[in-house]
Image: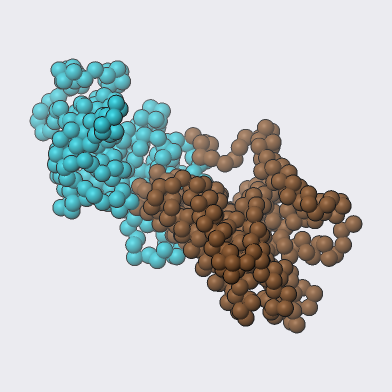
Chain colours: A brown, B cyan
Amino acid sequence: MISTAVIMSALELGFVYALVALALFLSFRILNIADMTTDGTFTLGCAVSATMAVAGHPLLALPAAMLAGAAAGAVTAALQTKFRIPSILAGIITNTGLYTVNLAVMGFSSNVNMMKTDTLFTLVKPYLGVGYKLIPSLVITVICGVLLVLFLKTRLGLSIRATGDNPDMVRASSINTAFTVTVGLCLSNALTALSGAVLAQYQKTADINLGTGMVIIGLASLIIGETLLPRGKTGLKVLGAILGSILYRFIIAIALRLDLPSECLKLISAVIVALAIGLPAIQGSFKPATKGGNDGC
Amino acid sequence: MLKITNISKTFNPGTVNEKAALTNLSLHLEKGDFVTILGSNGAGKSTLFNAIAGSFTVDSGTIRLDGQNITNMPDYKRSKVIGRMFQDPLKGTAPNMTIEENLALAYMRASSRHSPFSIITKSDRADFRERLAQLGLGLEDRMSNPVGLLSGGQRQALTLLMATLVTPKLLLLDEHTAALDPATAEKVLELTKKIVAENNITCLMITHNVSSALQLGNRTIMMKDGRIVLELDGETRQNMTTDDLLHAFHNQGVDNDRILFSAE
């Protein structure tokens, strides 16, 4: 039932979307912010990447998409920290605005076709053979994961972690929370945009609706990962997010293999997400919650 | 050192909830002063600390620390030179981060010379271990444990260490032992005395315990309705008994069961 091709494509997509899981690990788990910018930022990454690739710069497209994503994150952060808009609303506002921005980036068209365009993947195909899609996706995600783990050990990284963990304490330690929130959201949105950028080149098309539901898919991957690797240091948690994303793609692939019509995909995703996010609560009825600062006091 | 001149703060002005929390309050501290603050609930003690630490800006008046006007400085900048501890042991530490990481954060106050991308070095770690050992709680062997696993007393002792890791110009202690059991509270108080004395830190401490208000430090003030209603220092303070102080309370119209009980 599950062919090699299905496994390969699940792995490839798993690594590509894992960047969104890493982004949400940073914003949702570390900073404790449900960043609703994610959907729009993902599409922004797709749009920038596709437009740049069509213009003949498939590699430059990736850092450009990250920069664009970081800018979107900065807008959300500014709405939150300067204008005191609640974080969820700030994300939704940016997300709404991004719809127009994304259309504009794609030349006011709702999709960009890259069938005859050189992409990151077609460039490496002569050297990598069958793995030409898997290897670049894997390498990009692993590099981002390693850099994220290293970053979180630095003084700035520690400040960002503390901002999400105990804001009272952070202000008493001479850390500007507005600054740490901004850096965190810029980084997480850069990762999300990178994911969109790689995906657009992977499937040789960008569409205005590609990002729809991305925040939920990313969260599901993250939480599946946490269920796989419930405890451990930051490195293990990042690894968990990547594994969670891959497992999520396998679940989707199996669901599709069961001859479910593709129109049902969104509903299947929603059910999987609800189950994945609900799982810790179901487990919680058997063992005490691990998250939170009240233990041991 | 610390010069507070005529500060006032009214919360929710112009509404039914209007509350004058601080009224023309002035306070002058010399370097090395250790002032204990008494007063019933709602007297404005914590509001005074919030004003000094910059949790809000005062409506009028000025606050100067070491000659520098800090009246309008944001809280995170003030915390470079002001250490603060709360009653709630959960407030001062990040529970999901390790002891070592918490200390590294506290250490950042002084280390502007470090790049934001620098990591905890071996010498930092050795330094933290030595300082933790001075607490005498065995925390130096648990540096990679998350702080959430520690008891309230251990967390409060760690917070004390974090607040003083880089010697602050001013230390604000807001009933920092009130949530601990008596034996642990005694231990944390002893540590506080030791650290404050060793580093000659200027310190303000809110307490509800009349006897420790008289025993600790060199000055005592009493607050009521956002004002300082009684100031004790020198010989008057030395000759003061807890009973005298309780009488003073009654004369000021301060009636507080918590204070009365704590005088036992």
The front one of A52 and A254 is A52
Left or right of A55 on screen, residue B2? left
Kindly identify the residue that appears in the image at 67 percent across and 32 percent down: A285
Q: In which quarter of the image is the C terminus of chain B?
A: top left
Q: In this view, does A180 lie above or below B3?
A: below
Tell me: residue A167, above or below residue B10. Answer: below
| Figure disc tally | 0
Q: Residue furthest left?
A: B235
Q: Is residue B44 above or below residue B258?
A: below
Residue plotted at (29% across, 17% down): B257
Let me know if residue B112 appears in the view.
yes
- Residue that sits furthest to the bottom in the current view: A126
Quadrant assignment, res A103:
bottom right
Q: Which residue is drawn at 66% across and 69% down?
A: A112
Q: In which quarter of the image is residue A246?
A: bottom right
Q: In this view, does A56 lie to the left or right of B182?
A: right
Residue beneath the point at 57% across and 63% down? A102
Q: Where does the image place residue B126, in percent across and percent down from the top left?
A: 43, 58
Q: Which of A115 and B237 is in front in this view?
A: A115
Residue found at the very far front of the displayed protein: A108
Where is residue A272? Give x, y as percent. 73, 46
Q: In x, y percent, where is residue A135?
A: 72, 71
Give A228 or B132, whichever is nearer the viewer.
A228
Q: Can residue A19 be seen in this view?
A: no
Q: Which x, y percent locates residue A159?
A: 44, 55
